[in-house]
Amino acid sequence: MHRHTYAATIVLSLLLATPATALIMVGKGNDPVNDAGWPVGSLELANQKTRVGYWEGPPFGGGQTCFLYRGDTAALEAAVKAFAGIRAPALKLVVHAGPQNSQFIADPKDPKADTHYDWSFTVWNPASWHRLFNDPRTTFMADSPNFHKPVDPPQLDVYVTDRIDWKKITVPDGITVIDERAAEGPKAAAGAVIRGDVFDMATGKPIPDAEVRVERQPKQQRDAWDKVASGAANAAGRFEVTNIPAGNFRIVAAAKGYAPRVLKYEEFRDGVTQKLAVELSKLATLRGVILDTDNKPIPGVKVRASNVMAIDGRGYNGPDPEEVTTDQQGAFILGQLPTGYAQVWAIKPGWYHVEPFKLFDLPPSRPGLTIQMVQTGAIKGKVVAANGKPANGSINVSPPGDPIGKWGGSTNLNADGTFEFKDVPPGPYTVSTRPDLPGVTPDPNAQHVTVVSGKTLEVTVKQ
């Protein structure tokens, strides 16, 4: 089996209580894998010989593994039987119109190599899920649809083509089957269909005239989205969007007096029909002022809402994230936010937001929200090996105690063993060639330093 990684980061902010790596692990072939804390029975399915590859993610914690398979109807029947043997609170099987392909099983040396797969098996390590999405001490993943949700059940996704006769597959009891090739109501003559209802989150009442639109991102335009299809809700809040072309899109819901919301990102195929239950939260405005430690206003600070949540405590992503700049009085106004909760990120070179993870009510319970910033310092220096020559590797800066909500970082050393951390908040830190993480032996050569606003601290560390 070939195994490699995608998308590594160098600098890490200490937002989580556990090690966080922004890596996607990829494997090809069907060599046996080991149990990674999955529900009982998962390993048997994961190691079936029809497997052609897998990937493990997501970034910032991992714990989700997706196995990819190729085979005929008989092989799928065996996979479904093994899937039914998994001991978990729920099992989900989704039927799609095929074919389906994956970049993770592509051959970079052969652009014509087969990248298709016929079904996939996705499973989570429950502990990883809870650390990532359900840690009550942090809202780091509040913008994820998984935030504060139970663990996703093991899921089998089947992509039907002429290689598989789905009608011959027997699905055992205990498996929830969702067939996305057809759903209630008439099938579209062309393209895909979304049907559903839009409700007011606070009252549960339907929202007439709400718009649900399907948008596509033009190539090489990261911040632009074009509407390709839409539908308006009737007096009962019911909507239908038809003639959605095949492709990758985002789905947005909006209504007068409500904060617009990105519902999800989805790949559509011709003939697919989906149902959605949509909840919108009424608009709220966040007004405030940013001051320094002497209570003087700080102009020119970029301000945006972060980890926005509605009144249900779940993430609520807007289609156009707002970013404003404070005026000469340090004042700012953020609109287009839902009634609920949010953090505020204040960013300006040379300054640090003192409480970046403080959660505010939307709208605030009291007018005149105040956010404090403090001038930063810097840490620069070099790492020397045991032989006195410049070292290679990485250097870590860690705050004392629980790292959640505190600044910390890691970076690779330069060729001459030097390093520099800019915009470091004032306070005590440990500088070491070893990460300050659970299970890692403390570094006897670590340097304990205190950063002062407006000052650059120089330090030499032995490897």
Image: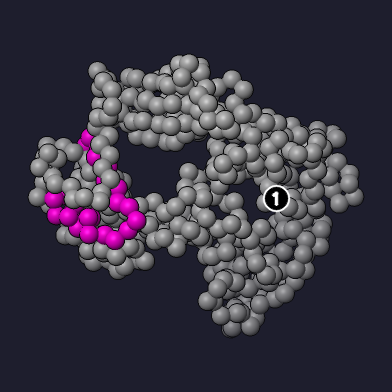
The mark total stands at 1
Q: Which segment did they paint magenta?
A: 76-101
Q: Residue at x 73, y 47 (%)?
A: 349
Q: Is residue 453 left or right of residue 422?
A: right
Q: Is residue 409 left or right of residue 7?
A: right
Which residue has dot 1 on it? 358
How far from the left and from the top, in percent, is residue 138? 60, 55
Q: Nearer the viewer, residue 437 or 36?
A: 36
Classify mark 1: helix, strand or loop: loop
How far from the left and from the top, in percent, is residue 208? 51, 18
Q: Does the magenta-highlighted stretch encompass residue 83? A: yes
Is residue 236 positioned above or below 202 on the image?
Answer: above
Q: Amino acid at mark 1?
A: Lys
Q: Residue at x 26, y 42 (%)?
A: 177
How far from the left and from the top, in percent, is residue 414? 59, 64
How far from the left and from the top, in percent, is residue 397? 65, 66
Is residue 289 positioned above or below 257 on the image?
Answer: below
Q: Residue at x 53, y 26 (%)?
A: 205
Q: Does the magenta-highlighted stretch encompass residue 49? A: no
Q: Nearer the viewer, residue 182 or 317?
A: 182
| Residue 23 in sight here | no
Q: Is residue 290 left or right of residue 138?
A: right
Is residue 181 positioned above or below 110 on the image?
Answer: above
Circle 1 Cα neighbour tier, 10 Å, few/some/many (<14 / 14–19 / ≥20): some
Q: Quadrant of residue 217?
A: top left
Q: Nearer the viewer, residue 60 or 7?
A: 60
Is residue 425 positioned above or below 318 on the image?
Answer: below
Q: Residue at x 68, y 60 (%)?
A: 406
